[in-house]
């Protein structure tokens, strides 16, 4: 089965530093997503991206966050100035049509564990 | 808004035991319901889904029935294996939304 690839698997950074989390979605997919899970809490939606722009974002996704598809294959999440509370597992996902309710399937990566010290 | 409440873990069972992981939801309209599984070191994978009331999703011996009257989607398996050890997430999507709403996940460990 095709895979979404995320790198790195673990990232440690100092508070206030910028981090970029990288994802390679499945090659023919058009919709891209970031979710995160703070330890012991729910997996939360951050942002969806289609046609080179953000299509939806949650209230978590404030000005410190940005997403980009810098080339035809990568999809990145940037946190400009990390805070302690940004420590979480970040999951990238992709889908081909974005219509998730019925027959569409969302493919997730294995996540990047971000630790902010 | 939408929310999913999932049985807290961790859950530890012996091989061949019966598994139930409870999941209840709150949603506007008529959501589609999902169970995702994350095996160690891997991404979240769709395990099963149900898109309307009374539907039963099933896969790999796991089942869950969409119960609108109790707003529940409990995951069951009659005889678990060591290879079922993973984290299980209940989730929903409602209407035309393009985002999943997840529960907090339940860690299952099956001992030989």
Image: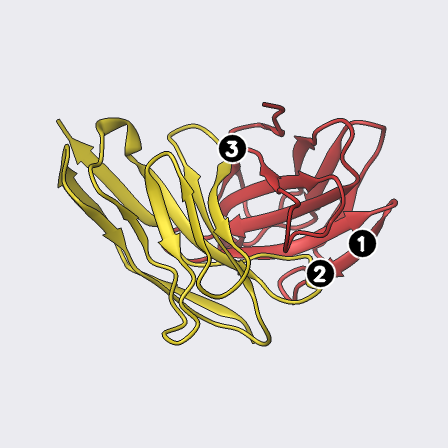
Does residue B32 show up? yes
Position in image of residue B45 (x %, y %): 50, 37
* Residue at which label 2 appears: A57
In this rendering, position of residue B68 left or right of residue A46: left
Q: Find numbered disc 1 in the image and state the secondary structure of the residue it sits on.
A: strand
Chain B palette colour: yellow
Position in image of residue B3 (x %, y %): 48, 69
Which residue is at 35% across, 47% downward? Answer: B63
Chain to which mark 1 belongs: A
Specify the chain shown as red: A
The image quarter in which residue B66 lies: bottom left
Does residue A117 show up? no
Which residue is at 74% across, 36% downward? Answer: A75
* Residue at which label 3 appears: A110
Question: Disc 2 to disc 1, how far (Cα)?
Answer: 7 Å
Question: Disc 3 to disc 1, how far (Cα)?
Answer: 22 Å
Chain to which mark 2 belongs: A
* Residue at which label 1 appears: A54
Labelled pair 2, 1 in contact (Cβ < 8 Å): yes
């Amino acid at each position: 089965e095709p895979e979404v690839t995320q790198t790195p698997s673990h990232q440690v950074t100092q508070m206030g530093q910028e981090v970029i989390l990288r994802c390679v979605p499945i090659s023919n997919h058009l919709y891209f997503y970031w979710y995160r899970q703070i330890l012991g809490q729910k997996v939360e939606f951050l942002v969806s991206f289609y046609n080179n722009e953000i299509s939806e974002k949650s209230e978590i996704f404030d000005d410190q966050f940005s997403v980009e598809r810098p080339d035809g294959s990568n999809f990145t999440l940037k946190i400009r100035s990390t805070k302690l509370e940004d420590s979480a597992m970040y999951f990238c996902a992709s889908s081909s049509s974005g219509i998730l309710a019925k027959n569409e399937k969302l493919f997730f990566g294995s996540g990047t564990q971000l630790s902010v010290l | 808004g939408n929310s999913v409440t999932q049985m807290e873990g961790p859950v530890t069972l012996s091989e061949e035991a019966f598994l139930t992981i409870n999941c209840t939801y709150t949603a506007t309209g008529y959501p589609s319901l999902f169970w995702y599984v994350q095996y160690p070191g891997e991404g979240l994978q769709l395990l099963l889904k149900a898109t309307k009331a009374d539907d039963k999703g099933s896969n790999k011996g796991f089942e869950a029935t969409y119960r609108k009257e109790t707003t529940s989607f409990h995951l069951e398996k009659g005889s678990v294996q060591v290879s079922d050890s993973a984290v299980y997430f209940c989730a929903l999507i409602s209407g035309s939304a393009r985002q999943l709403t997840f529960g907090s996940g339940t860690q299952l460990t099956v001992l030989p």
